[in-house]
Image (cartoon, rainbow, N blue to C red):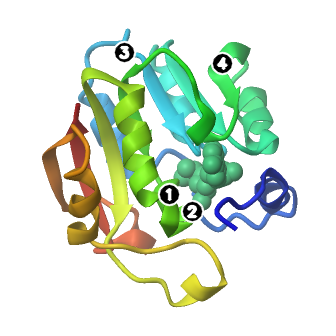
Amino acid sequence: MEFLSEQYWNNRYLTNNFGWDIGQISTPFKFYFESLTNKNLRILIPGAGNSYEAEWLMNAGFKNTFVCDLAKEPLSNLKSRCLIFPDNQLLHSNFFDLNIEPFDLIIEQTFFCALNPMLRQNYFNKMQSLLKLNGQLVGLLFNTVFDSEKNGPPYGGNLNEYLNYIKNTTLKVIKMEPCYNSIEPRANRELFFILQN
Ligand SMILES: C[S@@+](CC[C@H](N)C(=O)[O-])C[C@H]1O[C@@H](n2cnc3c(N)ncnc32)[C@H](O)[C@@H]1O
């Protein structure tokens, strides 16, 4: 099965089985977002989950922030925490089915690793199609192997693997390096990257 179902992901939220959820904006994104000056950026967070990052952005005045998730539950959770989040910017959709005006900035955090590895090239192709010219995909990718991979996500990966997918797209690598300010449980296991269309 290529896709874990909407029901699978929704149940993970409903049964509190969401070990990836850190309950607050992660440090690398807080630092990165604080460096952004253009509040009009059109931003997408796919596989957003409860998305404390989207909440932070909206509260900081980045009004063109969109989130996308296959599961309804985390979108409702985000709305209940952040009432000013516009309903039409909560996209209840499969990321691969999105058909929407392209973005200046797309954020990756623990979405890629949740997808079946068979979808990895499709992921970068889809990112390319969702970015404006000069738009950027920014985020974190794991640089590790997970012992539990046989049983399902998260799926690990490494720099060379990622570069092999990226070279088949128009995306250019601006940065892809060990992340120096990961949250403690992910320390030394993440790459911070910026790709530009
Ligand atoms: C491991 S969670 C990460 C959530 C969030 N990024 C975070 O850091 O807390 C993966 C998320 O991707 C969503 N997801 C999985 N497959 C998806 C797809 N094809 N399209 C959109 N969302 C998807 C799941 O519902 C889940 O919320």
Q: Are marks 3 and 1 in contact (CB under 8 Å)?
A: no
Q: Are marks 4 and 2 in contact (CB under 8 Å)?
A: no
| Residue under the point 23% across and 62% down | 164
**Is disc 2's CB within 8 Å of ligand 1?**
yes
| Residue under the point 23% across and 68% down | 159
Which is nearer the N-term, disc 4 or disc 1?
Answer: 4
Left or right placement of residue 130 versus residue 9 in this view: left
The label shown at residue 85 is: 4
Disc 4 vs disc 1: which is toward the camera? Answer: 1
Left or right placement of residue 115 versus residue 180 in this view: right
**Label 2 vs label 1: CA separation?**
6 Å
Q: Counting other residues with Cα less than 10 Å from the Cα at mark 4, is it few (<14), some (14-19), or many (20 or more)?
A: many
Q: Amino acid at mark 1?
A: Thr
Callout 3: SS: loop
Quarter of the rendering containing residue 99: top right
Residue linked to disc 3? 41
**Is disc 1's CB within 8 Å of ligand 1?**
yes
Where is residue 125 drawn, in percent x and y? 38, 43
Residue linked to disc 2? 114
Inspect this view and state whether residue 117 appears. Answer: yes
Callout 4: SS: loop
Residue linked to disc 1? 110
Seen from this angle, which residue lies furthest top? 40
Quarter of the rendering containing residue 130: top left
